[in-house]
Image: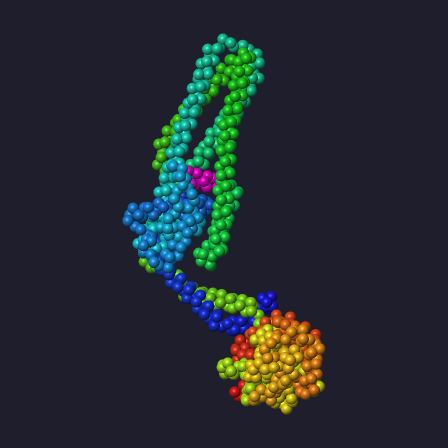
Amino acid sequence: MINDWKLDVGQLARAILAQKYFVMIGTLIITLFGVGLISLKEDEYTASAMLVVNDRGLNVPEAEAILEDAALDAESLLNHVELIRSADVIRRAVKDLGDNGIRLYSPEEDSGGLLSSVAAAIPSDLWQDSNDAEVSDSAGGLASRLSPEHLAYSRSIDVEVLGRSRLIQVTYSHGDAEFAAAGANALAEAYVNVKREEQLAIGNDAVQWMVEQAATLREKSSAADEAVEAFRRDSGLLQSGGSRLIEQKITETQTQLTQAELDSIALGSKVQSIETALRSNNPLAVTEIADSDPVVNLRAQITEFSAELADLEATYGQNHPLLVAKKEQISLTQRSLDNAIENIVAGFRNQSASAQQRVAALRQVLQQQEQELADANLRGVELRDLEKEARIGNEVLEGFLGRLQQVAAREDVRAQPNELRVVSRAEIPANPSGPPRTLLGLVCLVGGFLVSSSVAMLREASRRVIRDPEDLKTIAPNTGVWIIPRREGGARRDEIDNLHHLITAKPYAHFSASVRNAYRQTVATIPDDQHTVMLTSAQPGDGKTTMSLCFAEVVANTGRSVVLVDTDFRRPKIHVHTALGRIAGLSDWLEGTEPLRCKRPQGSEFYTITAGSGELTHPDRWNTQTIRELLDTLRGRFDTVILDTPPVAALADPFLVAAESSMVLFVTRWQHTKLSYVRDLIKPLAERTPRVEIILTDVDIKGAASQGYKAPMEYYQDTAAYYTE
């Protein structure tokens, strides 16, 4: 049925007009709901503080000069923006505010409100922020998730880079102007303090690593000195021959060993920095991790998905199914990013382990070569090499210890190497800002109308019933369609059940004129010897019995003798409308218990054969032979025979009667009969009878015209003065 629907502008307008009250109420409800949600959003004060990030160590004192320099790495700035919004900085800012006696969020204030009720219904797991990852603390446990207080604070902050400058603007919005300024300043200062602590921790780790390396170098130097002394004690074993080749091999091995040790030290340093970044939950601070292609691509995807999530939240609100799918997509991408970082870290660890294994292997090779040199009595060459190695080791140790003292003395530089500081504190704002309520109200109004209209269209498409006579003409192009209007003012049940009396009582009414016109265009055009007319419908309630009575009344008023036969044995109605009661009729004649009797209702000129006294006749007795016998009997006495049959969709009886009838009047009802029924049933009827005409009853002429349907609705509006009621 929905497949029958053809969407165009006219159909859309008619669907809206047909359900105008539904559209109006739906639009009103959606608009009021939207305006109510908008009214919950109070005016807020917005304050901004600015940070300067001098990653290159440039000494630029003024913010104006910083704005003019656009050479800063954009990726580094974005990294700062992400860190400012991280859970650690938010917790630090809220803690600093709490230490100063400022509570930006109080659950008791919203107790009992609509927003608090909705928030209470949301599972606690949904309070976790996307930036609030599970971070290992110093004890190896899991850090707590963001509380509602932290979450409310994080949702009111905004961090952005001012153009391509080194300035980062931190914005915070709150209903209180002083709290807005305090919240912005607290976040900026908290980030500066957190970064200083991280840099100091990194510097201390570097000093500790250098101390460990110095101890290792001291052990190597001592071992070299001891080897020289031991060799001197064995110098009496020196012999000549074959020393140059082994000396060359030893030199090459020592070079490889030195390079391997340097590689091991460098990789160890890199692993230490990675471990430090992991402990601080900031693996992206390591260049090798942040610049790797998988990490860059996954971070870009997360940024893109986050933007799409923000758009979806702005469009559908917080509880739409699309938001759940998008959050799941972001979560999957974040897990992929974590896996990629773990693979890179594992790769560095494996490289460091491999470098250490290579150092051990080269040392073993060197020992073997030294043993070969001893066996070849080349102790002199080995002694010189040992002395040289010991001398170099001592020089390296002395230089490394000097560098260690210099670094240890400059902890103040390590604490703030990037010149990160607050250059502009937030001031208390004077004027509040709020949502554009008028514009949003209009958006709600338009959105409500569009949603209600769409639902109205779906309702129309789901119940594809007859509303336009042109639909019937499209289904049956060779069949006439005759309009019978709804009886104006006929609200009482007795008037509706006895509409056929209007044909005589009010002959100039629109209803009477329409029935009479339909008769003249259909039944009156049949030759006199073929006035056998069958009336049927697609489904119950279409008005076929009423039309049978009306046509019988019209035929009787023309002076022709007419009989109306009720062949609907299962749900007979003729005896009810004519007040004859369940007297003997057609079923009794078929059973052979009573003769065929014709009764004339009181106040009417036509005769009637009712369906019977009440007992259903056997279905096999109503067949082609009995139908012909009945019609032959009636044609000999009456000029016109009208047969009221059951609905075509319910029984096969109408097809038997149609084969013996001169004309079939297929009765349909406006806004009741389904078009699919007419399309499926009209063709089989047309194949069994010489002529089929369609009667469209109960048409609300004024209502149809107001919904955009044209003729004959327009004709009635222009000629309404010619009819009387």
Query: What residue is rendered at 50% in x and 47% in y?
Result: 332
The image quarter in which residue 3 lies: bottom right
- Looking at the image, residue 140 sits to the left or right of residue 450; the answer is left
Query: What residue is rendered at 43% in x and 67% in y?
Result: 29
The image quarter in which residue 501 lies: bottom right
Query: Residue 156 location in percent, x, y?
Result: 38, 53
- Nearer-the-camera pick, 496 or 652: 652
- Nearer-the-camera pick, 260 or 303: 303
- Looking at the image, residue 347 sits to the left or right of residue 623; the answer is left
Assign the N terminus to one quadrant of the image. bottom right
Query: Residue 16 location in percent, x, y?
Result: 51, 71
The image quarter in which residue 202 lies: top left
Q: Which residues are magenta?
A: 278-291
Q: In the rendered view, would you say 284 is above or below 685?
A: above
Query: Residue 471 location in percent, x, y?
Result: 61, 74
- Nearer-the-camera pick, 609 or 145: 609
Query: Residue 397 location in percent, x, y?
Result: 42, 24
- Nearer-the-camera pick, 253 or 364: 364
Query: What residue is rendered at 42% in x and 64% in y?
Result: 33
Q: In the rendered view, would you say 600 is above or below 409?
A: below
Query: What residue is rendered at 37% in x and 29% in y?
Result: 405
Task: Please name the predominant secondary structure of the magenta segment in the image.
Answer: helix
